[in-house]
């Protein structure tokens, strides 16, 4: 089996970053509403240093959308940032990652793209939810629904069967079990079948929807990690600051996961304007939303306190 294998500390500890959307200076993701991801990355380093997460971490996992537009110069920015992390990094692609520039740029020393890893009694599987890599580079990839595809779903099952690990954890970009516009019926069915066939899968971690959430599929938790760029609270209909997740994987198969949002005056929470809410309710498409947002006076945005 390919992939790194090592004895971690008493309880393997992992920091998850997702949707880092690294880009070139001055570019802002998401129609210009995205945050300064370089700044957010530096703040994660400080925050995870202060609370001890970084010094106790065995690994940092980045679950896709490493860069914003799949460009080679954006991967240079991502590589410079990720290679500065003091622990090994493993990453997988999201729908904003284009295969060819990603392969040219990664892996590199300290930043891997392993598809399987063994940490003590745990097997980590890294799934490509871009239809197993069969959605080719280009604009269609940006908007494609998440799916594993037959080859990737088969590979995941074979890796579990080939391993004597007591517990399995799956990392991917698109989360299954999401309501609303981000729902992929295909991915939900594929992951549901995988979970039914493999009771040793203890949980899944993903990103993509730019939110902090813990969902549930087939009796297993699906942890969703916020982005380093704009995030959303889909119950309060507000924006959220950038953030990250920390996991501890116990030998009995249980998982602790805590989300850390970078609460700061730099990233205040705003009530989502109506065009954004209508977009998430699938009543407007992305361009219609941007058109209507463009007519808004930013001074009218209502700032709200964290609950
Ligand atoms: Fe993203």
Image (cartoon, rainbow, N blue to C red):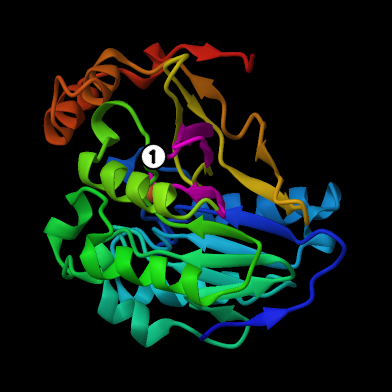
Q: What residue range appears in magenta?
A: 200-222
Q: Is residue 192 above or below residue 293?
A: below
At x 40%, y 62%, the residue is 23
Q: Is residue 79 magenta?
A: no
Choose between 185 and 224: the one closer to the eye: 185
Position of 28 with respect to 201 (left or right) is: left
Position of 214 with respect to 119 (left or right) is: left
Residue 196 percent coordinates (x, y) = 41, 47
Residue 32 percent coordinates (x, y) = 32, 42
Quadrant in which the C terminus is drawn: top right
Q: Is residue 140 above or below residue 229?
A: below
Q: Main secondary structure of the magenta part?
A: strand
Residue 66 percent coordinates (x, y) = 43, 63
Q: Is residue 206 magenta?
A: yes
Choose between 22 and 300: the one closer to the eye: 22
* Residue at which label 1 appears: 209
At x 61%, y 14%, the residue is 305
């Amino acid at each position: 089996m390919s992939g790194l294998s090592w004895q971690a500390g008493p309880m393997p500890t992992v920091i998850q970053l997702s949707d880092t959307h690294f880009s070139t200076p001055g570019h802002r993701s998401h129609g210009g509403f995205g945050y300064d991801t370089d700044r957010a990355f530096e703040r994660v380093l400080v925050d995870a240093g202060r609370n001890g997460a970084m010094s106790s971490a065995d690994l940092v996992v980045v679950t896709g959308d490493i860069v914003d537009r799949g460009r080679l110069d954006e991967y240079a920015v991502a590589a410079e940032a990720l290679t500065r992390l003091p622990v090994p990094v493993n990453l997988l692609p999201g729908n904003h990652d284009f295969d060819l520039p990603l392969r040219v740029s990664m892996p590199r020393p300290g930043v891997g793209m392993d598809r399987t890893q063994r940490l003590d009694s745990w097997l980590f599987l890294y799934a490509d939810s871009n239809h197993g890599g069969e959605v080719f580079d280009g604009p269609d990839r940006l908007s494609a629904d998440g799916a594993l595809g037959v080859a990737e779903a088969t590979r995941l099952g074979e890796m579990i069967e080939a391993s004597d690990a007591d517990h399995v954890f799956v990392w991917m970009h698109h989360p299954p079990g999401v309501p609303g516009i981000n729902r992929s019926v295909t991915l939900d069915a594929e992951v549901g079948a995988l979970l039914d066939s493999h009771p040793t899968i203890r949980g899944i971690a993903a990103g993509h929807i730019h939110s902090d959430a813990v969902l549930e599929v087939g009796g297993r938790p699906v942890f969703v990690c916020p982005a380093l760029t704009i995030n959303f609270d889909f119950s309060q209909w507000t924006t959220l600051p950038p953030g990250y997740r920390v996991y501890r994987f116990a030998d009995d198969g249980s998982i602790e996961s805590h989300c850390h949002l970078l609460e700061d005056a730099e990233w205040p929470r705003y009530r989502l304007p109506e065009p954004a809410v209508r977009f998430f309710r699938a009543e407007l498409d992305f361009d219609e939303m941007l058109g209507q947002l463009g007519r808004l006076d930013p001074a009218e945005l209502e700032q709200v306190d964290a609950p």
